[in-house]
Structures are given as structure tokens and as C-alpha cells.
Image (cartoon, coloured by chain):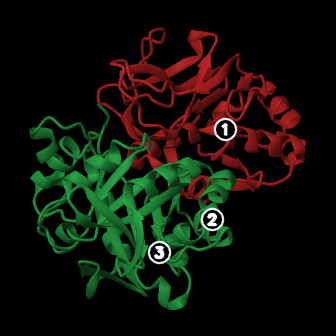
Chain colours: A green, B red
């Protein structure tokens, strides 16, 4: 069994770290850089930054922030939100990101996945998928932060994205995001059993045990969380300790 | 005494993080874009992200391959990271067979698709994994991993291919993935190379880079 990764997700609006509920309704939490450094020092395995208002500006605006954070944070950084072209991808990777997460643009232009994978490597190309339950064991792909339907089946889309070159899947449950009701375990399990690239589960973490379920039942390789950390309901130490007590492998970390 | 670190930029990968990590450790850092500057370096670092084929093609097209071999033969400290390690070998099987620099005997092949239990392996190998001592090296004294023996040192890997040195004695550290032991780092005289990314491995990674700076 491999070490499971603990990955805080930071949604950014302009200069602020924000948090939404069910992917709409935003609240300002504070300074992104300070939070990023804190999570790094607390033992986060990676960090994900999403530009929450990229669609307003037509592009990802996080390069300056990432450049600043990458000065003092030495763990992998993934950036998403509004990445539409290979130039956007290059710009963000050069600013200090290791991976880019693409959702909307990949659906309207799937060749972008192959282009990024070819130029920068599959490991840098994370396909970000928002999934909403439509019936038992079936989920629909959404875009634009959970606002737009696509009519596509999540499992089919994920398999296609991986065959095009995506090296990792960031899977977010639209239903569970920001609710702290736990992850959609069936969703995670369906997706992770349908591809052989790593899957990061996102959306719904409320208590440490949710993390355990996402891995043991959902078979996620990594788990991402926002609400519980930003609102200080849990710390990364709490999550790590829960994993250790339940026999889940996580990297050994001493602050 | 901390000397100057020269990082090779052959235009393909993001080297900002490597630069920052060395700077953070207090090193003076210069970036080399030009093959003629390679042999002027006192400590050379070759990063590498993406594909072996892409990187080696770029290195060759800029005439950097000859200069890297010349540098290595001058016996000065050398550090290769990820694809920067893979390129040292005879050849890689990524996207067809592509020849490497041939500085270290051996090849680069795909991570096995099945775990030791016959389950499907996640590929790429993305995440933190522990460095373990090899079957031939009894300790890490006087190496860049000195002091890490008792701490289960976890470092960050992201790759689909691994190096297989022909000579086991160059293996400096291994890792286990899917229960299968593979090469995490090598050392051969002045040449040190890591499959993992020290610049993405938090405090342990910075420790390793710091020891390279102090050679």
C-alpha cells in the first residue's frame, strides 16, 4: 500500500483565500500565502490552488501568487481555474506550479489534454472533474464550478481524459462540496476502479474518519480538503494522527 | 564553505523551484543556458521534468551532451534530478528506445504495471515514499543522505519510468512501490542523482540539497 497524500485546497478570489458552499456562495477566509505556508509547515503533502473567478477574467490570474508562495514552500503545487490554452499552462508552470488542473477547457477541447501531456509530461496534467449524482451509480460531469451541465457520464469522461494523457484525476463531488457530510464514496470508488492513474478525492470532508473512508472504501490515492482546514475545525496533524491510528499509510512527518 | 551552484536550463522544464530551493539553503545560484558554460561550473545540477526523449533531444541539439560528459570527467560534484538522472544512463524505453548519455551503465524502463500481489499499479508513481538503504550500501555516511538513516525519510516522487543500473554498487538508495524495490538514487564517484525531487520534498529535500552544497 502506498502513502496516501493529504492535500489542502485553497480557492482564491483576487488576493483572498475564500471558501464556498456547494461550489457557490463565497466567504473570505484570509491571506492565501500565510495559509499556504502554515499548511506546508503543518505537513501538507501537496497544495492545490483554484482560481475561483477565472471565468470572470477569462483566464487564470494566480501566477503572481504562486510565484510568491513557491519562494518558501517546497512541496508540489497544483493550479487550476480558467486554464484554456497551452500558453496558459506554460505561464503557470513557469511561475512555480508543478501541475495544472483543467476542467472546462478540457471538455470543450479535449486535445488540450494531449497537448499539455506531450509538452510538459502527463504528470503535470491533472484532469479536474466535477461530478453530480443523477441516479444510483451514475454521475454527470459539470463545468464552470458546478454550474453548467454537460450531459456527459463521469466515468466515461475520466477514462477518455486519461487515455488522452491526463496523469492524475482530481475528482470533486458537487453534491458534497462544502457540506462536511462526507465524501461520495460510490463516486470515488467507481472512478478509481476505472483508471490506473492516481485519483484525488475532493468534496465533503467533515471529520477525520471521512478521510479514512475515502481511501479504504473509495480507494482514493489522495484526499483534498478545504472547509475543515480553513475554518480550523481540524488540523493536518489531526488527519495524520487519524490515519496512523487506523493503519493508513501516510508519510512520516515531524514539524 | 558554500560554493556556487550552477543549474542547467535547457529550456524545457520549470527550474524555478530548483533555483529557489538552493537559494533557500543559502547557496549562490547561477543558471546556465549555454553549453560553453557547463565546464566552468564548480557544482553542476541538471533538473529534468517531462519526457526522457524530449529532454535528451534538447540537450543534444544544444551541444550540451558533450559538455556534460566532459564536466563529469573533471570529477567535480554533479547532481541529476528525475529525468536529469535518467539521462545519465545508456538508454530509456519511454516513447520507443532513446539513447542517453551513457555515463552510468544501465537502462530506464517502465515501472512494473502490477504490484507484487498482482494488483494494478497506479502509474505515474505520484507521492511521498521512503528512502531505504540498498542491498550493497551498508550506510549513508558521507553521502547526501547522511543523518537520514533513522528517520524513515520520505521524499516526493513523480515518474512512470525507473532507472536500472547495471552495477548494483552505484545504487545509493532504493524505494518500494507496490512491494517492488526500485532505484531512488545513485552515486558514482562525483555523480549523484535522484529519481525523486529534493526541491519538492519539504525539509528533508532541503537537507539533501544542503549536503550537496557542502560537498
How far is mark 2 from mark 3, CA to CA? 16 Å
Q: Give percent across and percent down for residue B35.
A: 87, 46
Check contact, mark 2 vs mark 3: CB within 8 A.
no
Which chain's residue wears label 3?
A: A
Residue A161 in the image, given as x and y percentages of width and height: 51, 55
User: Which mark, residue A81?
Assistant: 3
Residue A194 lies in what quarter of the image? top left
Quadrant holding the N terminus of chain B: top right
Q: Tell us which disc is closer to us: 2 or 3.
A: 3
Can residue A139 be seen here? The reply is yes
Q: Do the dots labelled 1 and 2 sit on one chain?
A: no
Determine the residue positioned at 89% across, 44% down: B61
Judge left or right: residue A219 versus residue B37.
left
Q: What secondary structure is found at the residue carrying circle 3? A: loop
For mark 2, give the secondary structure. helix
Q: Which mark is residue A93?
A: none
| Chain of the residue where label 2 is placed in the rendered structure | A
Q: How many labels does the image show?
A: 3
Q: In which quarter of the image is the C terminus of chain B?
A: top right
Chain letter of the residue beneath label 1 in the structure image: B
Q: Is residue A76 visible?
A: no
Tell me the residue that label 2 is attached to.
Answer: A94
Front disc: 3 or 1? 3
Q: Position of residue B101 (x, y in %)?
A: 79, 28
Checking the image for residue B84, the label placed there is 1
Amino acid at each position: 500500500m502506498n502513502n496516501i497524500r493529504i492535500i489542502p485546497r485553497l480557492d482564491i478570489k483576487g488576493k483572498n483565500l475564500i471558501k464556498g458552499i456547494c461550489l457557490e456562495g463565497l466567504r473570505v477566509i484570509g491571506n492565501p500565502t500565510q495559509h499556504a505556508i502554515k499548511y506546508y509547515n503543518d505537513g501538507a503533502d501537496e497544495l492545490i490552488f483554484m482560481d475561483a473567478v477565472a471565468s470572470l477574467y477569462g483566464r487564470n490570474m494566480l501566477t503572481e501568487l504562486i510565484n510568491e508562495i513557491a519562494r518558501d514552500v517546497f512541496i508540489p503545487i497544483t493550479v487550476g481555474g480558467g486554464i484554456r490554452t497551452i500558453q496558459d499552462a506554460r505561464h503557470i508552470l513557469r511561475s512555480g506550479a508543478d501541475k495544472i488542473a483543467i476542467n472546462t477547457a478540457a471538455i470543450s477541447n479535449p486535445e488540450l489534454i494531449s497537448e499539455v501531456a506531450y509538452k510538459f509530461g502527463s504528470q503535470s496534467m491533472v484532469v479536474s472533474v466535477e461530478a453530480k449524482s443523477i441516479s444510483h451509480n451514475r454521475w454527470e460531469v459539470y463545468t464552470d464550478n458546478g454550474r453548467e451541465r454537460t450531459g456527459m457520464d463521469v466515468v466515461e469522461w475520466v477514462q477518455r481524459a486519461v487515455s488522452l494523457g491526463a496523469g492524475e484525476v482530481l475528482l470533486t463531488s458537487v453534491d458534497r462540496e462544502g457540506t462536511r457530510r462526507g465524501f461520495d464514496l460510490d463516486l470515488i470508488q467507481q472512478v478509481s476502479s476505472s483508471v490506473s492513474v492516481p485519483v484525488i478525492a475532493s468534496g465533503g470532508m467533515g471529520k477525520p474518519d471521512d478521510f479514512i473512508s475515502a481511501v479504504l472504501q473509495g480507494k482514493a490515492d489522495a484526499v483534498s480538503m478545504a472547509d475543515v482546514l480553513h475554518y480550523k475545525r481540524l488540523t493536518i496533524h489531526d488527519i495524520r494522527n487519524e490515519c496512523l491510528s487506523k493503519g493508513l499509510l501516510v508519510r512520516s512527518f515531524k514539524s | 564553505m558554500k560554493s556556487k551552484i550552477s543549474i542547467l536550463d535547457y529550456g524545457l522544464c520549470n527550474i524555478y523551484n530548483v533555483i529557489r530551493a538552493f537559494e533557500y539553503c543559502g547557496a549562490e545560484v547561477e543558471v546556465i543556458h549555454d553549453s560553453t558554460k557547463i565546464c566552468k561550473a564548480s557544482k553542476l545540477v541538471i533538473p529534468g521534468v517531462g519526457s526522457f526523449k524530449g529532454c535528451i533531444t534538447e540537450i543534444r541539439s544544444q551541444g550540451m551532451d558533450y559538455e556534460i560528459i566532459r564536466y563529469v570527467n573533471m570529477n567535480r560534484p554533479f547532481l541529476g534530478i528525475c529525468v536529469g538522472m535518467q539521462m545519465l544512463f545508456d538508454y530509456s524505453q519511454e516513447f520507443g528506445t532513446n539513447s542517453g548519455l551513457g555515463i552510468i551503465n544501465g537502462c530506464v524502463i517502465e515501472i512494473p504495471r502490477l504490484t507484487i500481489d498482482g494488483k494494478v499499479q497506479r502509474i505515474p508513481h505520484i507521492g511521498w515514499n521512503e528512502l531505504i538503504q540498498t542491498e550493497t550500501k551498508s550506510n549513508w555516511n558521507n553521502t547526501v543522505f547522511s543523518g537520514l538513516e533513522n528517520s524513515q525519510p520520505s521524499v516526493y516522487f513523480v515518474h512512470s519510468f525507473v532507472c536500472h543500473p547495471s552495477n548494483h554498487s552505484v545504487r545509493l538508495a532504493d524505494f518500494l512501490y507496490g512491494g517492488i524495490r526500485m532505484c531512488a538514487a545513485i552515486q558514482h564517484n562525483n555523480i549523484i542523482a535522484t529519481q525523486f525531487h529534493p526541491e519538492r520534498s519539504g525539509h528533508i529535500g532541503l537537507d539533501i540539497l544542503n549536503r550537496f552544497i557542502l560537498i
